[in-house]
Structures are given as structure tokens and as C-alpha cells.
Image (cartoon, rainbow, N blue to C red):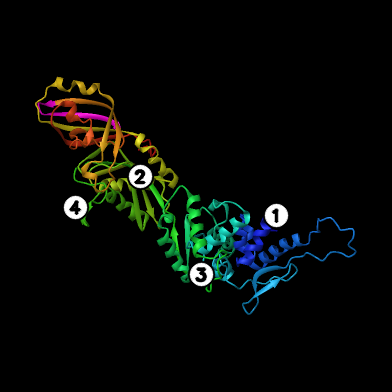
Amino acid sequence: MLSLKEKDRPIIRKLLDAGCCGRCVLRFCCVGKYSSYQLSIEDINKQLLAFLSEADDQPSCEASDPTQTEDPPSKKLKLETLQAGDDGGTETLTANAEPKVQSEICVACLGVLQDFCDQSYTTQVIIEVLFIFPKLHHEKSALLLVVFIREKSMCLDKEDLVQVKDAFKWAIQGMVGKDMGASVLTNSGFEVSVGFTHAETDGDCHFLATTCSDCFKPTKNKAVIFLVFGVLLSSNYPCPPVHPATRCTPLDTTLLHASVFIAGRYNKFSRELPQTPWVIDGERRMEGSVEELIAGPLLSSFRADGFNFSSSGREDVDVRTLGNGRPFAMELLNPHRARFNKAEIRQLQETINTSSDKIRVRDLQIVTREAMGRMKEGEEEKTKTYSALIWTKKPITHTDLDFIKNIKELKVDQKTPLRVLHRRPLAVRQRVIHSMSASFLDTHHFKLQLHTQAGTYIKEFVHGDFGRTKPNLCALMDSEVDILELDVESVDVDWPPAVPE
């Protein structure tokens, strides 16, 4: 039996009248039981009608009229469904009518849950289906009808109902597993992507994107977006939606392996190597980069189609990264090989390290997608340690540097530096210099060690950036100063875990 509740009865009637197929009726009634969607569409329709007829067969609870000599006429309600006859026309069915397979196109799923959940189609699907379905106005319009029936606000959460992609997977996974002689796993690393298109409503998608472009941007306030959709749909499309004339068309099936995620720490020893490819106005300025030197051997070994690189901050092209290195993570896209043991990973790390003397990698390991988030957690609360070679215009002595070691927890206001203003928004960011120390070299040079909040612009703190960073070392020393060399000595992020040599 279907997991339906008394409050679902008016919804079922309205959805059937509106032209929804049986599986979409289950979705909008929030039925989350996999086996319900694996029933044939005939069985689903039969059980829906039986569920509705239970209410029709209930005896009337009204008080009898003592003056009435005959039984009152039956109040059994005729159920109008969208089940069609052989000629494609609609029929009016009573509760006791023999249900037939619906041949009209569902107004919500556009035929996906009708025509593509049978044995003939599932033979094209192998292990796991990642369903990508166009966000059409029919789906939203049918959902608005459910909201109206339930007399709720427009803030019904998207998670309250079963999505088409989930219903599709539940409906076919049993047949796929049976045909392939293998279990269908929801957490499998192998994915089969099945796409659908619907030319009839393609223009509707463009209309929504043009009319309400903000609706298609990430937002925390989903309720407001849903309300905007409601206003747009109610003013431009009927609710319930009209019957589509054509069904969805399946696109090519794509076989993909889930991404593999690699993490580690890197050192950069060159002052002429950018972290990522350095391209300005479409022209590459330098050959090679940290990410390419790391990615090359990884792509070859995992036989991946591509990669995405991220790290805990970044250094300038002329800055070295020393000490324990900078944490990084790399997503390898559609790898054709995904399993490596620890010895093979160590060998892969050695291959990277021997391929160039400009970088070195340590603690290389395979991690999960979720673990990658730890690298970015509280990033600005982390600390970093730097060493810099400083030049001063005014001659200095040892005693001129004594005051630096006494500076603690210095708050610095930094306006977006001129050198990065082309790629970062203009803002004033407050950072903290936790501590500093200085080592005298000669009358115009000294070494400066800094322990700072992550995200501090060290170069700008030294020379002031034309007064955009306050206070700065120029003001503190009452002299023109500049930075000649800068090294990152440590990035204090306790991820990824250290790997014993």
C-alpha cells in the first residue's frame, strides 16, 4: 500500500485533475518510500483510486431526518482522472472503474516518470543515475497548486517534496540492479548521467532567467525566491499548468567516475613562479606554475580529464613558501583510475618532487570532499609567520630596531592594495600583527620577522601603499622603507594530517 495520509486526499484529486501522472502525485504528497515508485504506473493509479474511493465509501455522519422515509441519495463522488483511452482522449472514472495506463503527458515531469521508468529504457542505465533535469515552470506551477490546496504560505520548502530526479532513481534502480546483477549504491563512485530536454518549454526557462535573473543566483532566503516564482508563474502561466503536447527527449548517457580529492602541503623555492598560471589580458606572462607542476604527475597517474586546485591562501610570484609548506587540495575530474595504496601515493609524491627543483610536496594523501572544507574553515582566524628583508632610506643602528619587539597585537586597517584592486573589491580590512622582531644587518638593511593574522598584506604594511595601510612600518620608523624579499615561514593550519616519512 502507498504511504498516503488523510490530508493527501484533496491534493490527489486536484493533481489528477490537473494532469499529473501517478508518480508525480506521490512526489507532491511527499511519499519518500522507494518501493512506491518502483510499482508500475498501472498499479500506482489503481492504488490512488482505491485510496480515494475509501473516503467515498464512508457512511455519512450527518444526523438523520426523522421525517424522511427513504434513504438519502448516495453522495459517492465521481473521480475525474487524467487516464486516457486508446484514442488519447480523457475519461471520467468512478471509484470502481478499472484504471488504465495514462497516455497523456504529465504536466509536472513532462513524461520522464511515465515513459522512462520502464524496462526498455533502464537497459541503457548501468550502476547509478545522476539525473539532471531542467527547472521548468511546470514543476513549480504544480507545486504552487499543492501549496494552495494545503492552505500554507508560499514558503513551502523545496525539501518538503520528492524531487523528480529522486523519484526517477527510485523507480528504475531496482530494474537496473536486476539486469546488471549488481547492487545499486547511492554512494557509488561510478555515475551515469542521464539528461533530458524539452523543446516545447525551453523558451519558458529563458523567460524566467531573463525576467528574474536574481532567482537563479545562490541565496540563503529560499522562501523569498519561491515567492517571486509564485508571482511570476501566477501572472504568466496558468495554475495548474496546461497539458504539454510533447514528451521530454533523453540526451546521450554519460558515464563518469566521481572526483578524487588529493591533499598535501607544498614548498615553493623560486621567486619567479606563480601559484597559478599568470595570464594578463589573455597573454601568459610566465611559464609554469605551482598548480601545474603538482597536477601534471597526478593527472597522468589517475588518468583524469581535468582538475580544480585550491589552497590555504596564496603567495605572490616573487615570494617563497618555506617551513612546513602551504596546505593545498586538488579535485581530479573523472579519473579513470581511483584506487592507490599508500606506497603508490608515496611514489607519486616522489615523482612530483623530482620533476622540478622549484617546488616540493609533502603529506600527499587522498581525502574526502568533506575533509577539504577543513582547509577553509576559519581561514582568517588562522595565523602565518613571515620573514622579510627590509631596506631603509635613513641610516639605522641596532637601537633603532629595539622598539619593534615590543609591538604586540597591532591592529592595522588595510584598504585594498593598488596591485590587486583589479581583481578584488575595494574595501578596508582590519588585520592584526600579533608580534614582530628585527635583526640588524647593516645601516640600511635588517631582517623583519612577523607573526600575523592570515590575510594580512605584508608588503603594504611595510611601505604603506601610499597611505592605504595604517599604521605601517614607514610611519612607525619615521623613515622611508621598502621590502626587498619576502618568505612565508609557516601557515598555521593543522590540515592535512602529517604523513610519516
Q: Which quarter of the figure is the C terminus placed in?
A: top left
Q: Residue at x 75, y 59 (%)?
A: 55
Outermost residue, front direction?
67
**Amino acid at dot 2:** Arg
Which residue is tagged 4?
285
Helix or strand or loop: what does disc 4 sit on?
loop
Q: Which callout, 1 or 2, points to the residue nearer the camera?
A: 1
**Amino acid at dot 1:** Glu
Q: Check if residue 27 falls in the magenta segment.
A: no
Q: Is tag 4's residue or tag 2's residue first in the polypeptide sequence? A: 4
Which residue is tagged 3?
248
- Tell me, yes or no, whether the two marked residues, 3 and 4, touch with CB atoms within 8 Å: no
Query: Relative to residue 87, is residue 314 depicted above or below?
Result: above
Which residue is tagged 2?
346
Q: Residue at x 90, y 60 (%)?
A: 67
Whole-Å distance between the Cαs marked 3 and 4? 48 Å
Give the mark count: 4
Tell me if residue 217 can be seen.
yes
Residue 169, numbered label: none
Which residue is tagged 1?
6
Q: Residues within 10 Å of mark 4 (few under 14, many from 20)?
A: few
Whole-Å distance between the Cαs marked 1 and 2? 61 Å
Q: Quadrant of residue 445?
A: top left
Helix or strand or loop: what does disc 2 sit on?
helix
Q: Which callout, 3 or 4, points to the residue nearer the camera?
A: 3
Q: Check if residue 447 falls in the magenta segment.
A: yes
Q: Which quarter of the figure is the N terminus placed in?
A: bottom right
Q: Residues within 10 Å of mark 2 (few under 14, many from 20)?
A: some
